[in-house]
Amino acid sequence: MAGTEGTLLRQFPLFLPQNRAKTVYEGFISAQGKDFHLRIVLPEDLQVKNARLLCSWQLKAILNGYHQIVQQRMQHSADLMSFMMELKMILYPAESPDCFVDFPVPFSISWTPQGSLISIHSQFLAALESLKAFWDVMDEIDEKTWVLEPEKPTRSATARRIALGNNASINIEVDPRHPTMLPECCFLGADHVVKPLGIKLSRNIHLWDPENSLLQNLKDVLEIDFPARGILEKSDFTMDCGICYAYQLDGTIPDQVCGNPQCGQPFHQICLYEWLRGLLTSRQSFNIIFGECPYCSKPITLKMSGRKP
């Protein structure tokens, strides 16, 4: 109880108990940049639902039309502190409330001290509508391809890594404001698989039609059909790392592939780095390590990313 009283004093320093039993509180509550006089009389059992509120006429004017809500908050508040916080919310904060949304773009609200939650809700619905085309694009990709990463995409996620087969994949970064435009593309896999795809992308870029869906455009310019997860899993499409034999490792999946067409084994970057570093025959030049594949012993090259493993 002492903790609650301390919190009440911190939140409402101008609102103090007037007797030892602490059944009468009186003082001021701040809202909209002003202080309003308030007196609350509690019953002996301190139950807020049976309390009496005595407000200044200015506070009554602000609460006009909210009597039902105030009564409801009194009925459901566990203690005086809870009720006072609810009352402050009803009085609308002078500052813009914090809004937490799972959007791919910032959600900025237009707010005035006289604003209301209804206006925020309206702005939220408008923002939802503006992002519908983006989510339609991402939903189609999630439904019709094998998305390797992220495993469980949030509504704010703008990137997808999509399996192509032959241990190759494409990572796309979609612009949520222009979801049908050409996304940033990065191919991952052995050179003999991904280089032809890069050439097709450059050669067919003129075929990109913003009137078509992003997935259909990717099919057209890459001249491929994205294989479904079930088809790839039934084939010899290996996704587990050839060194640690795991798929997920500290949130990452294998993104290095042996360039030998007869091998094509994938590895986590950190696993391959540790393997090559332990070989007496491997050598390093700047951020590139040259060595041998743990599976087929053919030459393999690892280009380290900016982050050190």
Image (cartoon, rainbow, N blue to C red):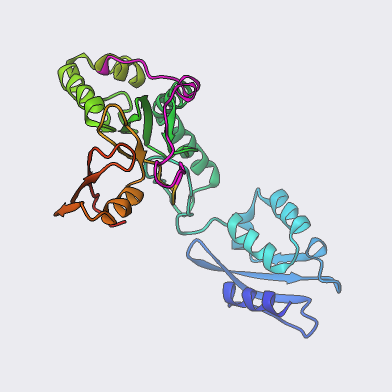
Residue drawn at x 36%, y 24% is: 165
Q: Nearer the viewer, residue 138 or 7?
A: 138
Residue 197 at what x, y percent from top left?
A: 23, 23
Is residue 307 in view?
no
Q: Quadrant of residue 262?
A: top left
Residue 164 higher or lower than 26, as above or below:
above
Residue 52 higher or lower than 261, as above or below:
below
Residue 179 at what x, y percent from top left?
A: 33, 27
Q: Nearer the viewer, residue 55 or 301?
A: 301
Q: Quadrant of residue 174?
A: top left
Q: Main secondary structure of the magenta part?
A: loop
Residue 170 at what x, y percent from top left?
A: 31, 30
Side of 202 relative to 158 (left or right): left
Q: Quadrant of residue 232?
A: top left
Q: Nearer the viewer, residue 90 or 220?
A: 220
Residue range in magenta is 222-248
Residue 164 at what x, y percent from top left?
A: 35, 24
Magenta span includes 33: no
Side of 303 relative to 29 (left or right): left
Residue 144 higher or lower than 149, as above or below:
above
Residue drawn at x 25%, y 44% is: 292
